[in-house]
């Protein structure tokens, strides 16, 4: 099948490359000429495990191409898959300008029937707006009889495991109001269906809402655990025991129950805000989500608060090692990462930082440029030298089993603030290090009491 993917970011690039890998002829369009030039010269603009090999393989086979040529991209695919960004607008609602620009662009160039697929995460009612934008453009061109369909096909892949998620999705949600488009979608996804039918066909609005509902549920679990972690600290319980105690209940399950220093990324924060705005727009404030968001905002400062409680609020002359910059492991995505809140808070209090991240240091340089209070280390242990404490913001695998004697020897003060609960408090304490986890600071955790 000939498929055009509009937007070559995390979702567009992964979807385009994986669809090409299934034997389709895919043309990826982007408005960013630098991104397309990089892709055409064999580079990959994002870090996603395994993606470069899939791209290379399919470019070499002639099944995957990249362009900035809008007319060519519209001419190419029966399926026009929109995978552009939907960032938060000023009021928190999803900014649809890129989606609608992509839709209008299709209408300006199309000369035959197209199936327009909304893969971007968009609020209920967006498919109607896309239809209206396309119809307006076609009318302007005098093409009143031209036909097209709009389908909602939200994407559920996770950065860091995106290739696997695309190839082995839990479900493929299709929102459509015509059988022909459903047939096209079935054909496109047929190779992913061999094991069992993963396609869920529903009306368009339900499909649009399903994506937000999924992210809202996951974010709710995280904020719920973070709030309980804070209570666990007050009452002297250990949130890790609590997590195992409730996760073992099959009605609850273990996923997304880890307490930590808050969620970030390109999806949860903006999607929670967008769903709240949708609720308000329809006269139904979503109170649970208000709480989810405000708990998360506060939780992003939890590491900073612990550091200030331990070292005082004037951190001039203090130096911190920071392990982890990306909003989660497996990606270089820094959007709304907790590390940003930690670094900015430390700088504001006068401290300096040496950071290490396996893949996100370049992205951090893009954000902050060169500054005297931020250095980068070549490996995790090099970041420790002369630091008053180690702060962990991302649960990369490489941080999970450190040699604690090396940590103790290289840190100026043997103190760890672990925003992802990577270690057992008692084990760390037994090695002579002071340990501050999340929800694990009670007397039963084995951690020494924090100094005033
Ligand atoms: N990143 C994720 O993990 C993830 C997962 C599921 C869903 N989503 C959703 O998918 C959508 C895309 O997210 P992303 O993270 O891939 O975004 P991104 O910012 O990485 O990529 C978007 C790309 O679209 C391009 N673009 C913008 N306007 C364009 C236009 N008119 N024509 C062609 N290209 C255009 C941009 O230049 C950019 O390269 C969002 O709605 C997001 O919520 C993201």
Image (cartoon, rainbow, N blue to C red):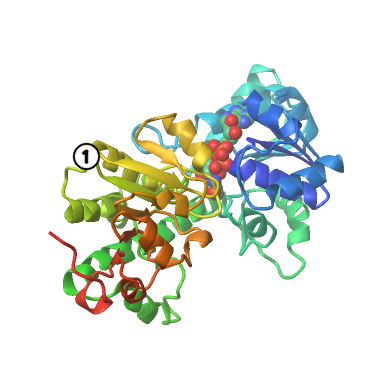
Circle 1 is placed at which residue position?
Answer: 316
The residue positioned 79% from the left and 51% from the top of the image is 21
Residue 76 drawn above or below residue 168: above
Residue 389 appears in which quarter of the rendering? bottom left
For label 1, count other residues whose C-alpha is less than 10 Å away and answer few (under 14), some (14-19) or many (20+). few
Q: Does the residue labelled 1 lie within 8 Å of ligand 1?
A: no
Dividing the image into 4 quarters, which one contains the N terminus? top right
Q: Is residue 13 visible to the viewer in this orientation of the structure?
A: yes
Res. 275 in view: no
Which quarter of the rendered image does ligand 1 occupy?
A: top right
Q: Give the farthest residue toward the right.
A: 61
33 on left or right of 240: right
425 and 86: which is toward the camera:
425
Q: In this figure, what is the number of numbered marks?
A: 1
* Residue under the point 53% across and 34% down: 129
Point out the image quarter for the C terminus: bottom left
Residue drawn where x is 62% and y is 62% of the image = 171
Residue 221, horizontal then vertical, whole percent: 38, 64
Instruction: Give the camera-side residue of 409 and 309.
Output: 409
The location of residue 355, given as percent across then percent down, is 42, 45
Q: Residue furthest front?
A: 409
User: Which residue occupies the foreground of this view, 113 or 74?
Assistant: 74
Under circle 1, the secondary element is loop
The percent coordinates of residue 369 (x first, y second) are 44, 29
Residue 297 image position (x, y, % from top left)? 29, 49
**Position above or below: 37 against 213:** above
């Amino acid at each position: 099948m000939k498929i055009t993917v509009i937007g070559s970011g995390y979702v567009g690039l992964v979807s385009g490359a994986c669809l090409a890998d299934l034997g389709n002829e895919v043309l990826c369009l982007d408005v960013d000429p630098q991104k397309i030039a990089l892709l055409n010269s064999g580079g990959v603009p994002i870090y996603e495990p395994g993606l470069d090999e899939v791209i290379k393989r399919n470019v070499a086979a002639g099944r995957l191409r990249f362009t900035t040529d809008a007319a060519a991209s519209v001419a190419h695919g029966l399926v026009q898959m929109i995978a552009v960004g939907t960032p938060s607008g000023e009021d928190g609602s999803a900014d649809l300008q890129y989606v609608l620009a992509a839709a209008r662009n299709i209408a300006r160039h199309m000369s035959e029937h197209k199936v327009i697929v909304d893969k971007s995460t968009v609020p209920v009612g967006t498919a109607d707006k896309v239809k209206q934008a396309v119809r307006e453009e076609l009318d302007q061109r005098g093409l009143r009889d031209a036909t097209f369909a709009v389908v909602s096909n939200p994407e559920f892949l996770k950065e860091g495991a995106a290739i696997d998620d695309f190839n082995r999705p839990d479900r493929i949600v299709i929102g459509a109001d015509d059988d022909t488009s459903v047939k096209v979608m079935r054909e496109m996804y047929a190779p992913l269906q061999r094991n069992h039918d993963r396609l869920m066909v529903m009306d368009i609005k339900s499909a649009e809402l399903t994506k937000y509902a999924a992210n809202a549920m996951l974010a709710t679990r995280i904020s719920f655990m973070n709030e309980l972690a804070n209570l666990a600290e007050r009452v002297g319980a250990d949130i890790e025991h609590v997590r195992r105690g409730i996760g073992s209940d099959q009605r609850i399950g273990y996923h997304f129950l880890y307490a930590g220093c808050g969620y970030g990324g390109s999806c949860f924060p903006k999607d929670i805000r967008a769903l709240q705005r949708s609720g308000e727009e329809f006269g139904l404030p979503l109170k649970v989500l208000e709480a989810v968001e405000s708990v998360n905002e506060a939780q992003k400062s939890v590491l900073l608060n612990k550091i200030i409680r331990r070292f005082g609020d004037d951190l001039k002359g203090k130096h911190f090692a920071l392990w982890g910059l990306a909003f989660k492991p497996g990606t270089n995505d820094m959007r709304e990462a907790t590390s940003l809140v930690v670094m900015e808070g430390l700088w504001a209090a006068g401290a300096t930082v040496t950071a290490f991240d396996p893949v996100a240091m370049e992205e951090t340089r893009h954000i902050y440029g060169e500054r005297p209070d931020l250095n980068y280390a070549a490996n995790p242990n090099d970041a420790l030298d002369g630091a008053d404490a180690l702060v962990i913001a991302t649960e990369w695998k490489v941080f999970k089993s450190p040699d604690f004697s090396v940590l103790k020897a290289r840190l100026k003060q043997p103190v760890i603030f672990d925003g992802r609960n990577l270690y057992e408090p008692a084990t760390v304490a037994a090695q002579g290090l002071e340990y501050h986890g999340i929800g694990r600071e009670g007397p039963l955790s084995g951690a020494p009491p924090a100094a005033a």
